[in-house]
Image (cartoon, rainbow, N blue to C red):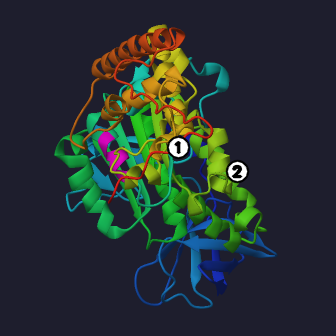
């Protein structure tokens, strides 16, 4: 961030106001015409000053939202403007560190010496300056790299209900990806889960090339919203250095819930399910900052918590329209012990045709067709009502369920390279083609395919029925 940009954002005026009233988590201040987004401090009688941000205006009063609880604030406290624009200190020394939404270290180590600065809220790259996405990013997860291939600079959503494995999946990506830098944003997480994610899901190897930004659920809504902007700003800094960055945010839903708190506190009218308009305005501003630029790329995976397993609830529906694809995690698959619980048929990567070969895409389509054929006839197969030989595609789908599930399932510590994922997928496709050819030939000849059980002969009308066997 150059010095000219910093000077242009400065408001060379000292502003001082006084607290008039509080409402919920907001503070109304008189005689304080500070701009929206400016930072201020509330001088309390006891304790250090309380930092807050201007979020709007109501009548003649300026509405502030504090970064901490309002203990000690009373009517008449002085409020002083401290900053009209925000920036972050950044640098390579952030790698391997855990920081809060303000960029301060929270991992018990000394503050890193950071020489560079970046704007807290940057504008996205101009649409005409964005290069096309032509190279694939390896996540290390076979189901994604093989059937939902993601490009460098693509934005994907990981949709699921609670307890289906979103955090585990993001942790696997952080450990196994071939990205240069990983930026992880934990928004609204339970405090217990932060260390669990860092130590168990991420591990020392993953943390060494990562920056973790944390805002737990007990922190004010403004802090949780800022955590998402801080993580995105850090990812933008490394992208400007020519790096391929992987941004993992858990979760975008909690970002939306935090902004809902702020919007309602500022006086916005509630709309769909209580979400104010600012929620649906801020999400595209945040998401569009990622992607590819002439210098580097930010590939983003946003976890989306689906309320009541409803894929059409407002946040999920809005996010799907903003992103370049989605990975759907199924509770039904998770209950069967199928991990990662990725429902391939409900998932999509819009940029897969641009970053994979024709042979790879054909193999992925073949596996999808077999999965769809099995799902369409699963009820008949499970009760034994399906007659083998009636549909060659279903016959092959039944025969290949075990190898396909073996491909889609993966242990947490197991890493799959792009070559391994593609090679295994092509082998599955060749095996399926051979089986399908044999099944079609047998069907054309009026015979059951090899290994098929013969159907019992139908009894003639009036013929005696065989006696039931004794139990």
Q: Which region of the structure is painted magenta?
A: 167-172
Per the image, label 1 sits on a secondary structure element best described as loop
Q: Which mark is residue 300?
A: none
Residue 127 screen position, x and y as percent: 66, 25
Tell whether 347 sits left or right of 416: right
Looking at the rendering, in which quadrant would you find the C terminus?
bottom left
> What residue is pinned by disc 1?
464
How many numbered discs? Answer: 2
Q: Quadrant of residue 325?
A: top right
Residue 461 screen position, x and y as percent: 62, 38
Q: Residue at x 38, y 28 (%)?
A: 399
Residue pushed farthest right? 59
Please identify the dominant SS of the magenta region: helix
Q: Residue at x 31, y 16 (%)?
A: 423
Residue pushed farthest left? 204
At label 2, counting other C-alpha atoms closer than 10 Å, the crowd grade (few under 14, some 14-19, many 20 or more) is few
Tell whether 60 sits left or right of 435: right
Of label 1 and label 2, which has the lower sequence position? 2
> What residue is pinned by disc 2?
281
Give the CA separation, mark 1 to mark 2.
75 Å
Residue 175 screen position, x and y as percent: 26, 39
At label 1, counting other C-alpha atoms closer than 10 Å, the crowd grade (few under 14, some 14-19, many 20 or more) is few
Q: Quadrant of residue 141?
A: top left
Query: Does residue 326 appear in this view?
Result: no
């Amino acid at each position: 961030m150059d010095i000219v940009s910093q000077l242009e954002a400065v408001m060379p005026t000292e502003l001082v106001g006084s607290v008039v009233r509080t409402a919920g988590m907001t503070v109304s201040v008189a005689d304080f015409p500070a701009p929206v987004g400016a930072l201020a401090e509330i001088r309390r009688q006891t304790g250090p000053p309380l930092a807050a941000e201007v979020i709007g205006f109501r009548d003649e009063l300026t509405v502030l939202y504090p970064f901490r609880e309002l203990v000690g604030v009373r009517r008449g406290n002085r409020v002083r403007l401290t900053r009209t624009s925000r920036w972050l200190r950044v640098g390579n020394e952030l790698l391997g560190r855990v920081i809060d939404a303000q960029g301060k270290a929270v991992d018990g180590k000394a503050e890193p010496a950071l020489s560079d600065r970046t704007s807290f809220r940057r504008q996205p790259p101009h649409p005409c300056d964005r290069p096309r996405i032509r190279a694939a990013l390896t996540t290390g997860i076979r189901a994604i790299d093989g059937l939902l291939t993601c490009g460098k600079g693509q934005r994907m959503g990981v949709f699921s209900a609670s307890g289906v494995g979103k955090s585990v999946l993001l942790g696997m990506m952080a450990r196994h990806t071939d990205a240069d830098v990983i930026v992880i944003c934990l928004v609204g997480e339970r405090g217990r889960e932060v260390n669990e994610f860092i130590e168990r899901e991420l591990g020392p190897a993953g943390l060494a090339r990562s920056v973790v930004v944390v805002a737990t659920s007990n922190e004010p809504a403004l802090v949780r919203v800022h955590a998402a902007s801080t993580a995105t700003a850090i990812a933008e800094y490394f992208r400007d250095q020519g790096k391929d960055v992987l941004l993992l945010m858990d979760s975008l839903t909690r970002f939306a819930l935090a902004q809902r708190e702020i919007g309602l506190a500022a006086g916005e009218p509630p709309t769909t399910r209580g979400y104010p308009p600012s929620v649906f305005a801020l999400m595209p501003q945040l998401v569009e900052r990622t992607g590819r630029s002439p210098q580097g790329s930010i590939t983003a995976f946003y976890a989306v918590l689906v309320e009541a397993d409803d894929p059409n609830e407002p946040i999920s529906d809005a996010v799907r329209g903003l992103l370049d694809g989605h990975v759907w995690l199924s509770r039904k698959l998770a209950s069967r012990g199928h991990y990662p619980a990725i429902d391939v048929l409900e998932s999509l990567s819009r940029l897969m045709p641009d970053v994979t070969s024709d042979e790879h895409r054909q193999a992925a389509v073949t596996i999808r067709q077999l999965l769809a054929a099995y799902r369409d006839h699963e009820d008949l197969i499970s009760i034994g009502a399906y007659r083998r030989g009636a549909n060659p595609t279903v016959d092959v789908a039944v025969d290949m369920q075990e190898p396909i599930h073996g491909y889609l399932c993966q242990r947490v510590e197991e890493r799959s390279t792009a070559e391994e994922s593609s090679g295994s997928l092509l082998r599955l496709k060749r095996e399926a083609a051979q089986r399908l050819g044999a099944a079609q030939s047998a069907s054309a000849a009026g015979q059951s395919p090899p290994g098929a059980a013969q159907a019992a002969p139908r009894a003639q009308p009036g013929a005696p029925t065989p006696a039931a066997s004794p139990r």
